[in-house]
Amino acid sequence: MKRKIAIAADHAGYEYKEIVKNYLSEKFDVQDFGTFSTNSVDYPDFVHPAATSVENGENELGILICGSGNGVQITANKHQKIRCALCWMPEIAVLARQHNDANMISVPARFISKEVAIEIAEKFLSTDFEGGRHQNRVDKIAVC
């Protein structure tokens, strides 16, 4: 059975979302929360449903893409059970999983290549949380 992954983007991340989604579709069950074109949109309309799906266990992990990666990350992190990390290089995605148990990442489409976006997604999805000394820190992240 394929692992379930959420993906969402705004208009600036649409093209990268389609590329990453198509690449990952061979190995994962990817649920696309939109947007579905390059027309200007409000990213929270797509990020909140994607984050909710990870928060409630419908999807195991999530990938968000926008121009800078910041807006989608800020929005996702408003969800109590989401730990979304801004990743602009594969090594950041690895550390976000290993040390922070990140369950979502945000990718800045305007600042990285499509190839790097795919590599970031691959590293994020293939890396496990190390637990151990990091678990106590992760347990302190949520406010309530």
Image: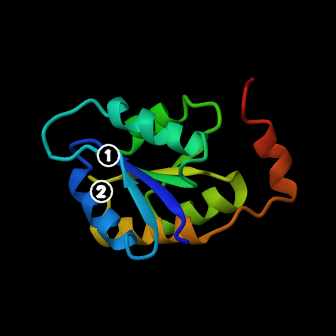
The amino acid sitting under disc 1 is Ala
Query: What residue is rendered at 73% in x and 36% in y?
Result: 141
In the displayed structure, does residue 57 sit left or right of residue 139? Answer: left
Above or below residue 134? Residue 25 is below
Q: What residue did someone put label 2 on?
A: 17
Q: What residue did someone put label 1 on?
A: 9
**Number of dots carrying numbers:** 2
Query: What residue is rendered at 39% in x and 35% in y?
Result: 71
The amino acid sitting under disc 2 is Lys
Query: What residue is rendered at 37% in x and 65% in y?
Result: 117
Q: Residue furthest left?
A: 39
In the displayed structure, does residue 18 sit left or right of residue 88? Answer: left
> Element under label 2?
helix
For residue 85, the mark is none
Q: Position of residue 77 (x, y in %)?
A: 55, 34
> Element under label 1?
strand
Q: Position of residue 80 (x, y in %)?
A: 64, 31
Above or below residue 139? Residue 129 is below
Above or below residue 45? Residue 58 is below
- In front: 12, or 92? 12
Above or below residue 87? Residue 71 is above
In the displayed structure, does residue 74 sit left or right of residue 11? Answer: right
Q: Position of residue 81 (x, y in %)?
A: 65, 37
Callout 1 crowding tier (Cα within 10 Å): few <14, some 14–19, many ≥20? many
